[in-house]
Image: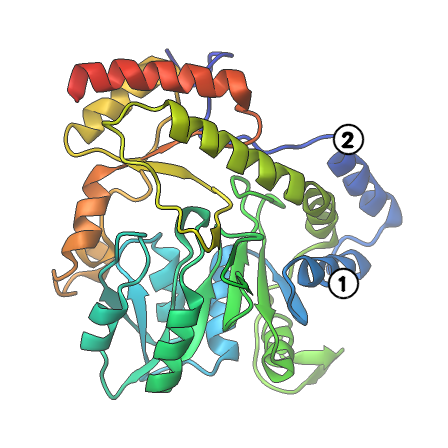
Amino acid sequence: MSDHDNDFIHIAAPDIGTAEEQAVLRVLRSGRLAQGPEVAAFEEEFAAASAVSDAIAVANGTIALQVALHSAGIGPGDEVLIPAFTFAASANAVIAVGAVPVFVDIDDEYMIDLADAAAKLSPATAAVMPVHLYGLMADMDAMAGFASHHGLAIIEDAAQAHLARRDGRVAGGTGIGAFSLYATKNMMTGEGGVVTTNDPAQADRARLFRNHGMMQRYEHLEWGLNLRLTDLQAAIGRAQLTKLPAATEQRRHLAGLLDASLPAWFERPPQPADAYHVFHQYTVRVSAHRDEAISRFRELGVGAEVYYPKALNRQPAFAGAPDDCPQAVAASQQVISLPVHPKVGALGVERIATAAMKVAGEFG
């Protein structure tokens, strides 16, 4: 069965409807397409939804991380602790500001292991980057304590964690946060990103950096780049943001159905009692035959994927990094993500569960 068959359950499916179409037409008819009133409105609405004082829209999620690092004062000579099990953007953004990523192993929630992070501190360590992977927010109480004790900035990679919460904290609200609005995220603008902060000075620095160092036209207070979001994208984002709470609840509902229906061979995603998991991905683990299982899922019409198949410290781009993150390596060899977006629906969950029974019967 190919990905183009109508009954194939894709790993992601953006919800694009009348609201998004009308938003784009509104901007096109206004004649103002670059950063303008739609971006300003989107930033205000995203900040409110994320319970932060400031949201700064930028061109994509990787740039959001770069802007967050820059705004926190991270640059050449600094080291940043990041988990080895994440998308390469986390490390690439560190390199983009001239700093050095230091790869840290993960715990059983796929989060940065603070014990290993402590072991990898050096005089150059300036920041720690927790990654809220798959929509589960890291334990930011523990992270805040760690960062405070060691004098580190916190850069939250919240690319997959829109509206995620944990123990009274919200994603992007503890340090300086970075969200992605890529086409497959829980809410999207095609490409786009958002930086969140409760620090007015960081917010001002982020706004300067994304706009050639300007607050007023042709008055360059410091150096910067063109990292702006367009009004077209922001208008889509505003429509998406109104759908996000209900879509998130649907993801959580579908994840609960998957929890209840998958065979025992599939280890369920971690769901700490104090966390509001937003399930960007529903990620299980298997002890063996992972790649064969994925191929079989796809033959059965289920778009299973691997996020991510190689720990960053083993990627050619970061050659020379110590091979000392065994839990990250194990996860990269065992994880399978199954579709959980709202378009899957209850009937889709039944099909996924039926396919999972077959897969477990053949390989488990």
For residue 56, which quarter of the picture?
A: bottom right
Name the side, left or right, on which 19 lies relative to 340. Answer: right
Amino acid type at mark 1:
Ala
The residue under label 2 is 18
Q: Which residue is mark 1?
A: 40
Distance CA(mark 2)–CA(mark 1): 22 Å
Q: Is residue 73 left or right of residue 262?
A: right
What residue do we see at 20% from left, 15% from top? 361
Q: Secondary structure at mark 2?
A: helix
Q: Is residue 120 visible?
A: no
Can I make out residue 313 in this image? yes
Q: Residue at x 45, y 70 (%)?
A: 155
Task: Decide: few, some or many residues near mark 1? Use Cα within 10 Å; few <14, some 14-19, many ≥20.
Answer: some
How far across and how far down the image is residue 63, in percent?
50, 62
Q: Quadrant of the C terminus?
A: top left
Residue sitting farthest toward the front: 273
Q: Secondary structure at mark 1?
A: helix
